[in-house]
Amino acid sequence: MTEPAEKKIAARAGIGGIAVLGAKVFFILAGFVQQALLPRFIGRAGWGALSLVMAPANIVNNVVVAGSTQSASRAVAGAPGRENEAQRAAMRVHVPIALGAGVLFGAAAIPIATFEHAPYIAAPLAMMSAVLFFYGLYAPLIGVLNGRGLFVKQATLDVLFATMRTIGLLGVGWLFVRRGLSGELGSTVGFALAAAAIAVVAGGMVRGASRASSSGAGDVLRGMGYVAVLFPLALAQLFTNALMQIDIMLLGRFLHTTGPSASAADEWVATYRACQLFAFLPYQLLLSLTQILFPMLARAKAEGSASEVRDYVARGSRLGAIAMGAMVAVIAGMPETAIRFAYDPDTAARGASTLRILALGQGAFAMLGIGCTVLSSLGRERTSATLTAASAALAAGACAIVVPAQRFGGDQLRATALCVAIVLVLALAACAVAVVRVAGSFVPLASTARVGVALAIAVALGTRIPPVSRLLAPAVGIALALAYLAVLAISREIGTADLRWVAGAMRRGKPR
């Protein structure tokens, strides 16, 4: 390949990477806006009920999306010159999967509603089966665009869908409430309409991108081999998403069995969902680091360089811990102010103590995500899946034992958050041991101690600051983050070498 051609490809990849990253940020922000506005459009109790609908749906949905996108992308990228055949062969696998996921989830609607002691969510759960079907078509189409290197088109679709989903959830939900109908049902109807529309648009875009190529699809992609690639990806996503959603699902059940009314229970579920919205931010934002770390580790492993693997893991996980600490310092240091930034003061007062606990626990989950990425990158997918599966089971067991014994409301929320936080810290410790055995390093103990001290100081400072208005919230958040970073700078944990390493990784995918 000539040097100008290489530069052209590199430039295209760089622009595409920026576009995909921008779309990811937009998707996260759109999701934040949705969750902040839904209580205003369908009521706090309606939003709580919708949260109980979305929790099990998200487990299945995220498995389908992540597994379908990654496997379709690999199949198309691995068939240069024969992308059309690989695309058609992949869709022959994913269309039945999408249909099966939708049908099975629809059949599970009544059992899930019965488990939650909330029969009125059966209809919205059934509507989510349509969402799962259309998502199951949309995700592999996104994977096809990714595998073809059409990153700008991929990003365009993601931004368009984030916008359509927001309009559907809010707009149709509001219309249902205005007519005296179920707001949670209206939101799921709007979601389904948006999913159907984006699947049609994505199909048209992929057809337009198709190029003429040779025949013989059977040699490009064999069904069983493709499923063999898809299955471990889906399994890992299943356990990770179960770990993220099991707490709110069990909490909803216990609130409905102990509360004075379904509406009261749903309002407390809404409070916990507001806490999750902020507590999940470190994990969501650190996903970008894992996407950089994964190819670097895979490349180093393929080259047989144990020293590079050890260096990448130590540097990447350490910088991840520093970034995680900064985000958790802000969220755990000003929990009531954070919730008030997006929700009403009553929700903020109800959830402040729960968010402080949950933020610390989800900080551990963010680091667990980095550790599991390392294990998967080095061929230890089973170890990663076992850790997340065991953690989900342990969290479920702890919540089932502890939460029902607590008083209805805030005590049950705090108990749920505490159970989850303890389990996630234990899971992170086990993951760290596994990573050190496989890669030879993880976050150095000295760095762990310094990040812990800086985090404790920032959170302690935050407890001295009373809740402030939305206008002043960013200033308080910045002050807490600066206090955290100042402690790390004074202890010489961070320096200019870290900035150079990050810049190198972002620019070339491999630091100097």
Image: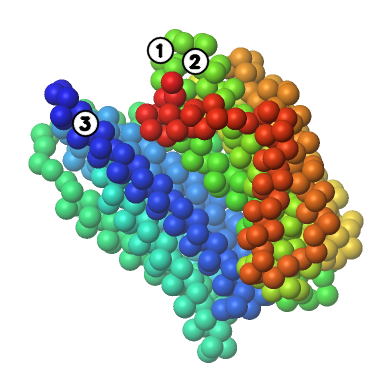
Q: Is 331 left, or right, of 282 in this rendering?
A: right
Q: As drawn, which residue projects farthest toward the bottom? A: 179
Q: Residue at x 73, y 30 (%)?
A: 491
Q: Mark 3 — residue?
A: 7
What is the number of the mark on residue 303? 1
Looking at the rendered image, the disc whose residue lies closer to the viewer, 3 or 1, is 3
Helix, strand or loop at label 2? It is: helix
Q: Nearer the viewer, residue 227 or 14?
A: 14
Looking at the rendered image, the disc whose residue lies closer to the viewer, 2 or 1, is 2
Q: How many tags in the picture?
A: 3
Q: Mark 2 — residue?
A: 308
Q: Label 2 amino acid?
A: Glu
Question: In x, y percent, where is residue 149?
Answer: 26, 40
Question: In x, y percent, where is residue 452?
Answer: 76, 36
Q: Residue at x 62, y 74 (%)?
A: 39
- What quarter of the picture does the N terminus occupy? top left
Q: Mark 2 or 3 closer to N-term?
A: 3
Helix, strand or loop at label 1? It is: loop
Q: Residue at x 68, y 28 (%)?
A: 492
Q: Crowdedness of circle 2 by 10 Å Cα count: few (<14), some, many (20+)?
A: some
Q: Mark 3 or 1 closer to N-term?
A: 3
Q: Are marks 2 and 1 in contact (CB under 8 Å)?
A: yes
Distance of mark 3 from mark 1, alpha carbons? 24 Å
Q: Residue at x 54, y 18 (%)?
A: 311
Looking at the rendered image, the disc whose residue lies closer to the viewer, 2 or 3, is 3
Q: Crowdedness of circle 1 by 10 Å Cα count: few (<14), some, many (20+)?
A: few
